[in-house]
Amino acid sequence: AAAASELLCATRWWVVLRAFGTPLKWREAVAFSAIGLFYSLGLPGSAGGDAMRTLYVIERFPEKKLAAALSVLADRLCGLAALILMLGWTLAENHGLFLEERLGRGIVLAAVCMLSGAVLLMGLWWTTTIPAIQSRIEARVKKISRQLLQTGDIFHCMIKSPRAMLAGVGLSGLSLAAHFLAYACSAQAFGSGQEFAPLDIPDRQAIQRLPDVPHHQIILAVGDPQIFVAGLHVAAGIG
């Protein structure tokens, strides 16, 4: 499941690259993504992996430096969109599970705040594509690079390729599903008290079915469409 998740992410980036006019082969996209994953795991955050992916594409297509950088950003935006949709779906299906307990409300509030902040930053970034605002920025901050303002072209490229972007969001959803499935399998393999409970069971009854684990050590991971189709949610207690 973890390998499938990474392959889906690589395929998503390959689709975005082609939409941005960079004819990278699928196997090359998978190879570059694997290298990026190695650096992401070895360095704090995922910026190192994204940088390596960008550098490899620039080396392969020197005339498409901006497109290479924007493709990685668009790839992340597709993942962000899928994450927001999955969060909304999760809350709609399991609002009682998350909002009844104080811990659940805190987790939901933190997630909503982080995603809202990301959306706000995307909106501010989009405003830099407006010619009038670009002129004001250049007039007030003369040291700013023109290439930095050109990063706003990512939105024009995404609008011109709606099918590719929708495909990217769909692949992101499948990747998240595989990721959560891998998490569920790993938790079960390590005996972390994972249990599958029907969604129509009241929250307290579902929690009571878990082993004797303190409530503050219970992690509720919901978001696997394959699990949703079966009408289940995942509750994993880590001791």
Image: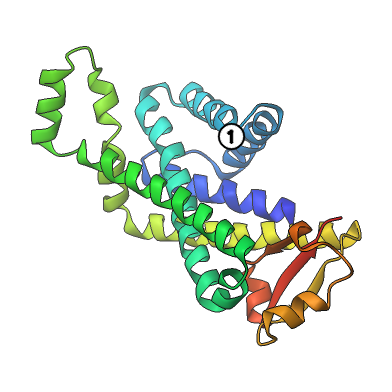
> Extreme front residue here?
102
> Is 179 placed left or right of 48 in the picture?
right
> Is 13 placed left or right of 157 in the picture?
right
Name the spot of residue 178 as percent of width and height, x first.
68, 60
Q: Quadrant of residue 56?
A: top right
Name the spot of residue 196 as percent of width and height, x first.
78, 75
Residue nearer the viewer, 91 or 13: 91
The residue under the point 21% across, 40% down is 127
Q: Is residue 144 above or below residue 22?
A: above
The mark tally for this picture is 1
How packed mark 1 is, by other alpha carbons closer than 10 Å (few <14, some 14-19, many 20 or more), is some
Q: Is residue 60 above or below residue 96?
A: above
Dividing the image into 4 quarters, which one contains the N terminus?
A: bottom right
Q: Is residue 115 above or below residue 170?
A: above
Task: Say how the picture is coloured.
Answer: rainbow
Specify whether residue 23 is in view: no
Specify whether residue 107 is in view: yes
The residue under the point 77% across, 74% down is 207
The residue under the point 40% across, 55% down is 164
Name the element at disc 1: loop
Name the spot of residue 197 as percent of width and height, x first.
75, 79
Name the spot of residue 158 as percent of width and height, x first.
32, 49
Dividing the image into 4 quarters, which one contains the C terminus?
A: bottom right
Residue type of the residue flagged with mark 1: Ser
> Extreme top residue here?
143
Residue nearer the viewer, 114 or 60: 114
Q: Which residue is mark 1?
A: 46
